[in-house]
Image (cartoon, rainbow, N blue to C red):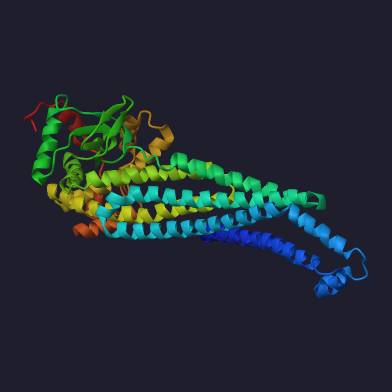
Amino acid sequence: MKRLVWGLVMLLLPLALFGWATVQHWRAETAQEQANITRQWLATPSDALLQALPWAARNQFAGRVDTRALLQRQLDELDTDRHWLSMRKWLASLSGWLAVGALVAGIGAWLRLRVDAWRALRSAHYLHQHMTASWQALGRWLSAYMGMLAGSLCLILLYETSAGLSHAAQGGLTVLVVVLPLASVLVVCLRTLWRMRQQWPHMGASKASFLGRALGRQGAPALWQWVEGLAAHLHAPVPDHIVVGIDQGFFVTSVPIVLQPGQSALSGRTLYLSLPCLGVLSQQETAALIGHELGHFRSRDTEQGSEINARFSLMCAQFSAMVDAERSVDWVARPVVWMAGQFLHHFQIAVHHWGRAQELLADRAGAEVDGPKLFVQALLRAIALGKVVDALLLERGGEGLLAALSQYLQCTPLHLDDDVLGSTLPHPFDTHPPIAARLDHLDVMLDAALLQAAMRQPSDHDRQWFNQLCGASAGSV
């Protein structure tokens, strides 16, 4: 409910400025009309002047002998301010139109956002082709909104300042009590507009950074032969790079990545293998998980899916920077932040919808390696392991993680909480479907035997097979 308030504020701000500009226009027009009427009164003969006045003015001037002199003085003041009145009338008109423009821009941004998000939810191709363009278009709409809002407010303040200076002798400068606080609101509008114009358009290239090391064909020929055999079995493309690191999950990507700490840049299809998992999973379980990842290559969704998720992550980072910059805000800038948040909310639904559809399709590939039950067993084991790794990372900060993990598992068995069906695997780009959805998709029942196999203590073979494979020569697989 609180968030919807900012959407309402987004509409009320230009409406309030439009109302203020309308009153200002009326004030200038009334002063011009008063000058014309006073001029007509003064053209009346002196003996008929009092009778020519309206009833209210007649009571005001009744009994005075200097009625004509007073009217002439008022006319002189209005004539002195004649040119400024015309200018203020023009300022008020332009300010009103800018307020209307801001209102249209705010409504247009919202409608464009909802239509684009609706289309993205119904077409993965549209999501891939137009998500970035929609984000940048939103930035232009909101820049126009904030720019016209700032323009309208600036003209309103110029009007009030001009009116105050013109009537300084009559105490008109007291208007500065109103103008000065509103000037700070104008500064906020201009500062927000500047930030948006500087930061919003620059998405940058889609890339990711991971702590890891690439294993080349010359350094690990048997590993490459094994992965190539899995790819041939699944009729999937072979990855261009195999990387090992301490991130928790297995994943594939087609966006450029940078490996830390060596700053090695990789492009093309990359298969990432998790060292914590490689010392706990059996070779068959690992093959099933790699089969799932190769399934992404087979369905050709990494070229689109990885880029979509990487770009969406960039948008989220931009939004976080915007929120941090406006944390002390000023309420006038919050509607812009609210609108950006609405974009991410509605597009996140589309991103997750298509991402999860791709994950369920890739599960079929993982199940083709050694059957769906073994694939589910590997998933459960990886999820349980992820919880342990999370705790160790929190405790040790990544230093000596593999040794600490091995020591921990010698003393403490893996386990899953009662909410296992709602558990998901960690992923750097996407959100995996919960285990319940994946079990249902693969038609596998979660029974005690399956849980027991997934939670078993790591055997010597579990701990050693990957190192042996990396050290073996080609043809020994």
Left or right placement of residue 174 versus residue 337 in this view? right
Picture residue at 70% right of the left edge, 64% below the top: 33
Task: Please tell me which residue lies in front, 275 or 116.
Answer: 116
Task: Please tell me which residue lies in front, 150 or 332.
Answer: 150
Image quarter hosting the C terminus? top left
Left or right placement of residue 38 versus residue 124 in this view? right
* Camera sees residue 151: yes
Task: Please tell me which residue lies in front, 238 or 306.
Answer: 306
Residue 420 horizontal/vertical position (percent): 32, 54
Residue 23 horizontal/vertical position (percent): 65, 62
Above or below, 283 relative to 129: above
Picture residue at 28% right of the left edge, 58% below the top: 436
Picture residue at 64% right of the left edge, 57% below the top: 89
Residue 283 horizontal/vertical position (percent): 17, 39
Residue 221 horizontal/vertical position (percent): 12, 28
Above or below, 237 relative to 368: above
Above or below, 87 relative to 471: below
